[in-house]
Every structure is written in structure tokens, then in C-alpha cells.
Image (spheres, rainbow, N blue to C red):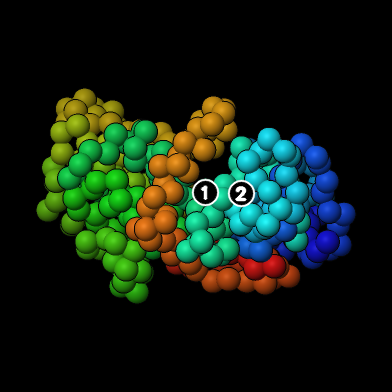
Amino acid sequence: MRAIVVTTLDGPESVSLQEAPAPADDSRVAIAVKAAGVSFPELLQTRGQYQLKPDLPFIPGAEVAGVVTAAPPDSGLAPGDRVAALPLIGGFAENVTTRPDLAFRLPDNVDFAAGASIIFNYGTVHFALTTRGRLAEGETVLVHGAAGGIGTAAIQVAKAFGAGRVIGVVSTDAKGAVAVDAGADEYVLTEDFSSFARSARNTVDIVVDPVGGDRFTDSLRTLREDGRVLVIGFTAGSIPEVRVNRLLLNNIEVVGVGWGAYALGKPGFIQQQWNELLPHLSSGALAPVLGPIFPLERAADALKLLDQRGATGKITLAM
């Protein structure tokens, strides 16, 4: 099979298209991959900076969609089933295997590129908003990085699960249009966020922050009593620090969101999430915003674009 292989830890330039043996394991679900999601974990893995550090050489790719070619009898799946799956590694290839509990039937209205864009982003923000953030009906949610894969997923999940108002924070008007198309009620430019935070003091219930950086303190200012900032990541590169007296004086929270470690350590948790997301996927209320789609052989270009923060929506590879 054709596969993308990381041979050195020198960033996106270290990946190359090679021939590799197809994986085989009767205890796992075998999938002919049609699309693979490209996410920050893969980018970090090319530099040896992610917590999962496979031995070199390895095939990256944690999230795929495709067609089942073989499955254990007790998996509930059969050859020919269309699935989204979380193999965790090995997905940038024409074939992959995954644990049976991490493969999920795709609704007929969800294509493979969208299917490869669901589990990581929507699983993360569903966990963030419902489990860690305790989203309640009618609350106001502010989303940083609102035109990216996590951001657009957060907008849609917030709306689908009861938010009354969703505000996106983006770097350009073009990205603002992406956020609004994803379901945001309005958007704010990052260059105007400090002044917005002063005018919006005590009006936001939840801030979804996959960005970090220097806007964190302003995010705290927007929160009303019992407000929560959900810390998902640090794509801006710097990790903010919190003056905890702000939390005490205003009765607000900073909440860590570590979906992967939490979900994978609890058998059945991701299946439960999928079951809660499924009606909204089937109805179209949750519809992944797709960014550029690259052929497999251009995986390095896909990773470079992600590294440069140059895309809106979810970047995928097509087999």
C-alpha cells in the first residue's frame, strides 16, 4: 500500500510517500481509507513534540474515514460499512486498522472528507462544552480561532446543544465569514478583541480557547459570574498565565480540556459521544467545515499549511 512515512523528526519536510505493508490484525477493524484528517498532533509528531512518540520510522494519521474490509464478528461492523474511525496512528495510508470501539458507522449524508473531520474536533468540543463546560440552554459562548477546524466545530456544537448566542474571534473578515457560515451569530477581529472585551465585560458564559497567547486575560474580562474559560490548546505558541485573584474576585473558572487522555481511558466514552452527536450529524446541524483537500502524496504540503495557520476548516488527505 502507499503510505506517508516520517523518517526523521525535522517537521513536515521529513515525511515522504513510500510503499509499506498493509496492516493485518484479526482483532481489529480493517479499513480501506478514503480520507484522513490532518491535525496538530500529526504536525507535532513530525517534530517529536507530541505526547505519543512512535519509534522511527512511522506512519502518522490518527483520524480517518473509509470502508470496512474486515471486522471481528463481535464488532457490530461488516465489510462494506462506511465508517469514521480513530486508529490513533497509521491513518496516512491506503489501509489501516483500528480498535472496534473506535470505528463508527457514518450517516449516508456525510461524505468521507467530512467523516474524517468529526471525531477529533467534534469529540473534543463536545467534551469541552458539555462535560467540562456544563453548557446550559441559552448561554453565550465565545470561540477563539473560530474559522479553524476546532473553532467551527465548537460553534456548531454550541448551537446544537443549546447555546443562545455564539461569538467568533478571527483574524480577518474572510475568516469571520467562515465563522458566520458555520453558525456564529457575529464575529470579532483579533485586533479589536481588547476593546471588545472591555465593552462585553460580564456578558459571556463560556470561552472556548484553542489558541492561548496574549488574549487570555481579555477573555477572562468577558465572563459573567460563574463563567468558564475552556483551555483546549495553544496554537498561538505561548501558554498564558492566570492571576488567580481574578478567579476568586469574579467567581469564574479556568477549565482544562484534555479530551484524548480522558476519553481513551474510559471504555465506551467516545461511543457515547458519537451517539449524542449522531442525530445532529444526520440532520445536518453538525456539518464539518472543510478546508483544503490534498492528495496523499502532498501530505507534506498539508502539514506545512497547518503549520502556517493558512487554512480555514479541516484539512484532509484524499486517497
Residues at badges 1 and 2 in contact (C-beta under 8 Å)? yes
- Image check: 171 left or right of 86? left
Q: Residues within 10 Å of mark 1 (few under 14, many from 20)?
A: many
In this view, 280 is above or below 139? below
Amino acid beneath label 1: Ile
Amino acid beneath label 2: Ala
Which comes sooner in the sequence, label 1 or label 2?
2
Residue 206: x %, y % from top left: 26, 42
Q: Nearer the viewer, residue 80 or 250?
A: 80
Q: Quadrant of residue 146?
A: bottom left
Disc on res. 42: none
In this view, 139 is above or below 2? above
- Image check: 234 left or right of 292? left
Q: Residue at x 29, y 34 (%)?
A: 134
Q: Residue at x 37, y 47 (%)?
A: 209
Say which element carries label 1: helix
Q: Which residue lies under the disc numbered 2?
A: 85
Q: Which residue lies under the disc numbered 1?
A: 119
